[in-house]
C-alpha cells in the first residue's frame, strides 16, 4: 500500500479508545481492526492511549500517521502486514489529562479496550477484587476528577457521560486475566462505589464488560528485531513489531453500543469465553511461567532454548497434561493433547526471541491464574501437583535468589520491595520460602493452610537453592519416570 492510500484509510472516526498502546495491542486488536478496514467492512478506528511509560513510541507513531509494520514470523514463514487502524494517540505526559477524559467521555466512543497488564486493574490477584490500598487507587480516591489509574480514568469518564446524558460504552479487557471482563467490572464498580453510590448503580445497569480470550505471542521489540524488519521492508520503521503467525481472539458478544465485525477477520464471538480463557491461561501462560522461571535460573535466555532442552520439554508436557488439563472444563471440540503439541510448536519458534526474563515479570500478578487455581483444584481432587509445586519454588528462587550461576536477578514486579526485604532478612532458605507463601495477595488460605503442600513447595525451593534449577528438573524427570518422548515430540 502506498502512502497516499494509507492516509485515505486513516480518516475513520475513533469509536474505540484503547488504553495500553504496547506491543500486544499493535500486533493483535489493532491489526484485526486494520484488516477489517482493508476489506472496507469497518468504519471504526482506534485512539490509543498510554497512561504510563515512555512517550517515545507515541511521538514516533504520530510522526508516521500511526501507520506501522507487523512482521508475522514462524519457523518457516514470514509476512509483513501494515496496520493503519490507529488514527490518534494520547499520553498524559504529552497532552495532559483533559484530552484523555474528553475522548473517553465523547459520545462517539463506543468501546474502551484495555491491555494494561495484570497490575493495571489494581486488584488483589488472589481474590480478583479491587485493592483499595493500591497506591494509584488511594491517590485517585483523593482527587477522582483528576485520575491517574486506568480504573480512575474510566470511572471519571463514565461520570461525565452520565452527567451529560450520553450513552455508556463497553469496557473490553484484552489482558491475560481469568474472566478479564468480570475482573474489570469488579475493579470499576468497586472503585465507583467508593466515590458515588449513584454512579456505581448507573455503571452496573448500563455498562457491559465482555470477557475475552486473546492469544498471540508478541515479544518486546529489540534492536535486532527492528533491523530484521527493516531488511524486509526496505525502510526503517521504529514502531514496527514482530510476532508469531498464530493468533486467536474469542469474545463474549456483549457490547452495549455496537462493535466492529471482528469475526469477519478471524475472531470468534461466543456466549461464554471462560472455558477458552481457562485453557489458554493454564496451558499456555502456565507453561510460559513454568519455563521462564526454571529456564531463566538454568541460564536459558529465550523460551525456544528452554523447550529445546528435552528434559524441560518432558517436564512441561507432564505439567500441561497431568496437572493443568485435568482442571479444565473443555468445549467438546477441543483435543487437549493436540493443543499441547501446538503449544510446544509455538514455543519452539526460534525466529521469535521471547525472553524468559520478559515472561518472568510481574509474577505476583500472574501466579494465581497460572499456578494457584490448578494447585487448589488438584489437591481437592487427588491429582498430582509436582510440577506446579516446582513452578512456585522456581518463582520463589527467582524473586529472592540468584540464578544457577550465582548471578543476582533484577526482579520487575509490583511486590519487588517486599521480595527485597524477605531476601535481605537474615533467615534460612526455609523461612524465606515460608515468608513468600504467606503473601496473601498471591496465595489464598486453601494453599497456606495445606501444610503438606507448603512443605513440598518449600522442599523444592531448598532443592533449587542447593542443587540449581536445571539439576532439579533433570532429577525430577528421572524420579517421576516420565515416559519417553514420542517421535512427534522429538522432531
Ligand atoms: P508492553 O510492555 O509492550 O505494554 C504494556 C502496556 O501496559 C503499556 O501500554 C503500558 O502503558 C501499560 N501499563 C503498564 N502498567 C499500567 C498500569 N498500571 N495502568 C495502566 N496501563 C499500564 O506489554 P504488551 O506485550 O503490550 O502486553 C500487555 C498485556 O497484554 C499483557 O500484560 C497481557 O495481559 C496482554 N497480552 C500480551 C501478549 C503478548 O504476547 N505480549 C499476548 C496476550 C495478551
Ligand atoms: C506471556 C504472555 O508475558 C507473558 O506472561 O505468557 O504474554 C503470552 O505470550 C501471551 O499470553 C500469548 O498469547
Image: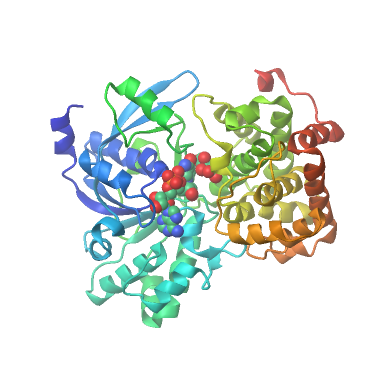
Q: Residue at x 16, y 30 (%)?
A: 3
- Up-down: is 331 above or below 207? above
* Depth check, front residue: 55 or 161: 55
The N terminus appears in which quarter of the rendering?
top left
The x, y position of residue 441, in whole percent, is 63, 64
In the displayed structure, does residue 286 sit left or right of residue 352? Answer: right
Q: Is residue 396 left or right of residue 233?
A: right
Taking the spot 72% from the left edge, 21% from the top edge, the residue there is 486
Residue 241 image-quadrant placement: top left
User: How many numbered marks appear?
Assistant: 0
Q: Looking at the image, which residue is at 80% across and 57% down? A: 454
Q: Is residue 136 left or right of residue 237?
A: right
Which corner quadrant holds the C terminus? Answer: top right
Residue 73 placement (x, y as % from top left): 44, 25
Q: Is residue 96 above or below residue 7?
A: below
Asked whether residue 210 is in view, the answer is no
Q: Which x, y percent locates residue 185?
A: 45, 65
Which of the two residues, 54 or 384, is positioned nearer the viewer here? 54
Q: Kindly identify the residue that appears in the image at 40 percent across and 64 percent down.
A: 149
Amino acid at each position: 500500500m502506498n502512502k497516499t492510500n494509507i492516509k485515505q484509510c486513516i480518516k475513520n472516526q475513533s469509536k474505540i479508545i484503547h488504553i495500553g498502546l504496547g506491543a500486544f495491542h499493535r500486533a493483535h486488536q489493532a491489526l484485526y481492526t486494520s484488516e477489517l478496514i482493508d476489506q472496507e467492512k469497518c468504519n471504526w478506528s482506534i485512539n490509543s492511549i498510554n497512561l504510563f511509560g515512555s512517550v517515545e513510541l507515541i511521538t514516533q507513531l504520530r510522526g508516521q500517521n500511526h501507520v506501522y509494520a507487523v512482521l508475522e514470523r514462524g519457523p518457516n514463514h514470514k509476512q509483513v502486514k501494515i496496520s493503519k487502524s490507529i488514527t490518534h494517540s494520547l499520553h498524559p505526559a504529552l497532552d495532559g489529562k483533559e484530552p484523555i477524559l474528553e475522548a473517553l467521555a465523547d459520545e462517539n466512543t463506543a468501546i474502551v479496550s484495555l491491555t494494561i497488564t495484570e497490575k493495571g486493574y489494581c486488584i488483589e490477584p488472589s481474590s480478583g477484587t479491587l485493592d483499595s490500598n493500591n497506591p494509584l487507587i488511594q491517590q485517585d480516591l483523593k482527587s477522582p476528577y483528576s485520575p491517574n489509574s486506568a480504573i480512575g480514568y474510566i470511572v471519571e469518564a463514565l461520570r461525565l457521560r452520565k452527567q451529560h446524558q450520553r450513552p455508556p460504552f463497553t469496557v473490553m479487557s484484552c489482558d491475560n486475566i481469568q474472566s478479564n471482563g468480570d475482573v474489570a467490572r469488579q475493579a470499576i464498580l468497586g472503585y465507583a462505589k467508593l466515590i458515588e453510590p449513584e454512579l456505581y448503580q448507573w455503571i452496573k445497569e448500563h455498562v457491559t464488560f465482555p470477557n475475552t480470550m486473546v492469544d498471540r505471542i508478541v515479544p518486546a521489540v529489540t534492536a535486532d528485531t527492528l533491523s530484521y524488519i527493516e531488511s524486509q521492508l526496505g525502510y526503517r520503521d521504529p514502531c514496527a513489531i514482530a510476532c508469531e503467525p498464530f493468533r486467536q481472539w474469542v469474545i463474549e458478544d456483549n457490547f452495549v453500543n455496537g462493535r466492529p465485525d471482528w469475526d469477519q477477520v478471524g475472531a470468534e464471538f461466543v456466549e461464554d469465553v471462560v472455558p477458552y480463557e481457562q485453557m489458554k491461561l493454564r496451558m499456555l501462560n502456565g507453561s510460559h511461567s513454568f519455563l521462564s522461571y526454571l529456564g531463566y535460573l538454568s541460564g536459558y535466555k529465550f523460551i525456544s532454548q528452554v523447550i529445546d532442552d528435552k528434559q524441560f520439554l518432558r517436564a512441561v508436557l507432564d505439567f500441561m497434561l497431568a496437572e493443568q488439563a485435568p482442571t479444565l472444563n473443555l468445549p467438546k471440540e477441543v483435543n487437549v493433547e493436540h493443543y499441547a503439541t501446538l503449544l510446544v510448536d509455538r514455543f519452539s519458534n526460534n525466529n521469535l526471541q521471547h525472553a524468559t526474563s520478559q515472561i518472568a515479570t510481574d509474577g505476583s500478578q500472574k501466579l494465581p491464574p497460572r499456578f494457584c487455581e490448578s494447585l487448589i483444584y488438584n489437591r481437592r481432587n487427588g491429582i498430582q501437583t509436582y510440577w506446579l509445586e516446582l513452578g512456585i519454588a522456581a518463582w520463589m528462587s527467582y524473586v529472592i535468589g540468584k540464578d544457577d550461576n550465582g548471578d543476582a536477578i533484577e526482579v520487575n514486579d509490583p511486590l519487588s520491595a517486599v521480595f527485597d526485604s524477605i531476601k535481605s532478612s537474615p533467615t534460612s532458605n526455609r523461612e524465606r520460602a515460608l515468608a513468600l507463601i504467606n503473601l496473601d495477595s498471591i496465595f489464598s488460605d486453601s494453599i497456606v493452610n495445606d501444610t503438606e503442600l507448603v512443605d513440598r513447595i518449600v522442599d523444592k525451593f531448598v532443592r533449587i537453592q542447593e542443587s540449581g534449577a536445571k539439576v532439579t528438573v533433570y532429577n525430577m524427570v528421572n524420579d517421576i519416570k516420565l515416559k519417553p518422548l514420542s517421535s512427534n515430540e522429538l522432531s
